[in-house]
Image: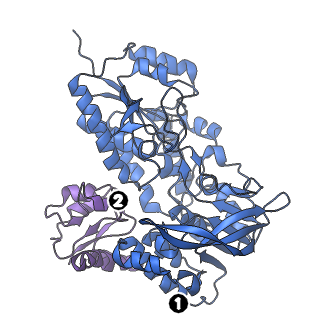
Amino acid sequence: MTISRPRVAVIGAGPAGAYTASLLRTRCDVELDILERLATPWGLLRHGVAPDHLEVKTLQDRFETETFGRGCRFMGNLDVGTDISHDELALHYTALFYATGTQQDRPLGVPGEDLANSLSAQEFVYWYNGHPAYRDLDVDLSGERAVIIGNGNVAIDVARILVKDPDELRCTDIADHALHSLRGSKVREVVILGRRGPAQAAFSNAALRELGDVRGIDVHVDPAEITLDPASERWLAEEAGFTARRNVQLLKGLAARGPEAGSHRRVVLRFLRSPFAITGRDRVESVVVRRNEIRREGDRLQAREIQGHDETVDCSLVLRAVGYLGAAIPGLPFDGDRCVLPNDHGRVVRDGAPVPGVYAVGWVKRGPTGILGTNKRDAEETVAQFVADLEAGTLPPPSMPSRDQLDELVAERKPTTITVEGWRAIDRRERARGAAHSRPRRKLSSTPDLLEAASDPN
Amino acid sequence: MTHVITDRCVMDGSCVEVCPVDCILPARDDSELEIVEQLYIDPRLCIDCGSCVSACPIDVIRADFEVADDRAYAIVLNASFFEQRTEG
């Protein structure tokens, strides 16, 4: 009897997939492939994390060492669900780990959302981070005011990129086309609308502090809007965590700060304000903003709209940053309410019973919460289920165990599948392009350019 | 003297795993991980061994005297995290 190593695929090379692959490498003796629909690995670390967060971007070096550096194979530019199906993969692998994240942004559900220059923050972030599907996004920065809807770290990231001096972004890996557009930007004011109050803001102290420290800009906070209602005041004193309490302190500090001499751009943080409609003839011209108040309902504090205080904020760009939604994967069950793969600690379940050999990790498992490192703990949980299943003998070997058959299928379906060597050629090219300009890398942001670089042996 | 984690921390816990005196919080499996936004080093317990510095995947841990001026608030932040816990 031949004992062959189980063959395992991680689908999605973002942080959750990378941490999963890294753990599988150290904890199990498996043959390991990472499948990714884009030509490049690392998902939101490459296309989500703000380009001026240079230190965070260096996490890719650790991912590289712990996965490809330890013999994981990469199959990039291969889209599971389009190029190859779940059922086909199941014939070739003992286990499949889905780490596909979320594929779409949450809509606002207000009239005018589809006007030109009303975009999701996700699209805008992908655009400035050089995601190939968004390099041609029509971002019009010719107006003086932009409105960002949402009160999380994405809203702050997007605001910071819009107001920061482009010369400070020049030393980052921001996409060339975005840097060019930002240099010509006429945006002078960015208004961030928070549905709830300052005590309930979802951004981190770090994000708020960083925004306050951006050179050459003012951060304007109206003291009246950060005066807490009694319910929030009590909540903050009795129940709130470190982050919420410090956010309120930081906001009070910003409210007390006068305009900086010589500042040329400003960010206005508004609270208890929701978009009621986005208006304009064929492009965004204004946002109708409705006021909210905080009410205690049961043990929760809710923002509820109040009538008669509507105001119109003229603007030419609207970015909604109100969260993400996962999308269903053909051939797998889907929890449409939570927009995740239904799972029990990472084992994907159908009608309450585990689907043998199918696991979920990251945002597609738990929903879009947590930060990069959260995925490591999440991956540990999922990998532990796999190890238990492997030891219990509940994972049958694949019906097509031959590596050659798998490689033939992939080569037939997607001749342009990118290997580890291909990705390393891309990486070298991007770093070399950057080095000439004292930048960590200059990204290639079109799939043809990426494929060309991948096939360059130098 | 102590070591300090700056607020770029991605909380993957590599430092917690190597700290010989368990002075980095929240620890593994602590439910507080869900509500904090970074990991913190307790200046009263840190022995300055530097193990966390090499463990950090993004190199954001420094000895306090090496913290850049524009990140000096991180020293106060690490200390105040433990002060507010004691008060609470």
What colour denotes chain B?
purple
Closer to the camera in the image, A300 or A445: A300
Q: The disc labelled 2 sits on which kind of residue?
A: Glu
Residues marked 2 and 1, same chain: no
Residue at 14% over, 61% down? B20
Residue at numbered disc 1: A256
Residue at numbered disc 2: B34
- The CA span between labels 2 and 1 is 31 Å
Q: In which quadrant of the rendered view does residue B38 lie?
A: bottom left
Q: Position of residue A387 (x, y in %)?
A: 25, 32
Chain ID for blue: A
Q: The disc labelled 1 sits on which kind of residue?
A: Ala
Q: Is residue B7 visible?
A: yes
Residue at 54% over, 61% down? A154
Closer to the camera in the image, A202 or A142: A202
Q: Residues within 10 Å of mark 2 (few under 14, many from 20)?
A: few
On the rendered structure, is B38 left or right of A295?
left
Residue at 16% over, 63% down? B22
Q: Chain of mark 1?
A: A
